[in-house]
Image (spheres, rainbow, N blue to C red):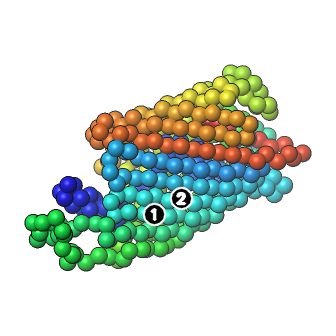
Amino acid sequence: MKKFFAILSLLVMWVANGYSQDPQFTQFYASPLYLAPSYAGGIPGHRVVGNYRNQWAAVPGTFQTFSFSYDHNFINFKSGLGFLAVGDLAGDGHLGTTLLGVVYSYDLTPSPEWHIRPGVGFYYVQQGINYSRLIFGDQLITTTGSDLPPSVSFPGKSTIRDIDVSTSLLAYSDNLWFGTTWDHMLRPERTFYGDDARTPFKFSVYGGARIILRGFILRPIEESVTGAFNVKVQGDSRQADLGVYWYRQPFLFGTWYRGIPLGGKHPGSDAVAFLFGYKYDQMSIAYSYDFTVSKLGFGSGGSHELAVIYTFTVKTKKRWRAMPCPTF
């Protein structure tokens, strides 16, 4: 057990020195403001979104991620405004990251069939760690009993704070969409020891297509099939996710392959995900399970994710084109 905690402590400190990647959701379209500021106001009214992810549930001290967002579509001003909060907790030392932000988007219509939506986000970022929960190597070497002596290792800062900016651009028609996001444009600090370790840029490219089987675009769609992708590059990490959804009112079923190898130093596969959702009136609830296919193996317990979306629809005389993303 002591050996386990020692290894875990080293892993936490390795992450704390800037080698980590951003938390990510399997249901990334169910956390739209975290995916791209361009999705702010992507509904005809108000929207509240909550997300929870428990990664590798059978491994002690692993990642838990929470997200909450609110956005509103100011149709008369062709604008969307939203607020985003994301929290991530990892490791026995409670390494935690908090992101609070304001996002804005503007709707352009170069043609009746296509909309282009640039977006920008401004964020406050805080990262913290609880050193009292960590066990250092010198504590294990200098004792033979059950009580560990204090460590002589010099801990760094317990909290670091910084600011960040992201931009995005989304183009969409009734059944097609394509977008890109540039996160961490200011490369916020991510080290507790004052050395030069900053968050690497993150670039995302995503899109998809929807085929309507029953229903109409301007009326509730009764059945559809949607294919989508998301490619992310951050530092030495390159990952592509590819999936398909089948929606038949009021249920949604989907499957995803996370981590399609794209080269780089960390190209490995991650998981095959299965999704089930239910939509009732203005509320959508979706659950997904990631079946681990990486070297971590079946012992990880997989990953669980839950998303809840509630939309407050506002009637308007102006014509509004819905974004053709997956229903959840």
Q: Secondary structure at mark 1?
A: strand
In the image, is 161 to the left or to the right of 168? Answer: left
Q: What is the three-letter code of the residue carrying label 2?
A: Val
The residue where tag 1 is placed is 97
- What residue sits 64% from the left and 64% below the top? 102
Q: Which residue is at the front of the view, 148 or 21?
A: 148
Asked whether the residues under the numbered discs 2 and 1 touch, taking CB atoms below 8 Å apart as contact, a structural biologist would say yes
Q: Relative to the observer, which residue lies in front, 200 or 279?
A: 279
Amino acid type of the residue tagged 1 in the rendering: Thr
* Badge 2: residue crowd in 10 Å (few <14, some 14–19, many ≥20): many
**Residue 106 vertical position relative to residue 30 in the rendered view, above or below:** below
Q: Is residue 214 left or right of residue 57?
A: right
Tell me, for residue 86, which label it has, or none. Answer: 2
Q: Residue at x 43, y 63 (%)?
A: 96
- Residue 232 x %, y %: 46, 48
Q: Residues within 10 Å of mark 1 (few under 14, many from 20)?
A: many
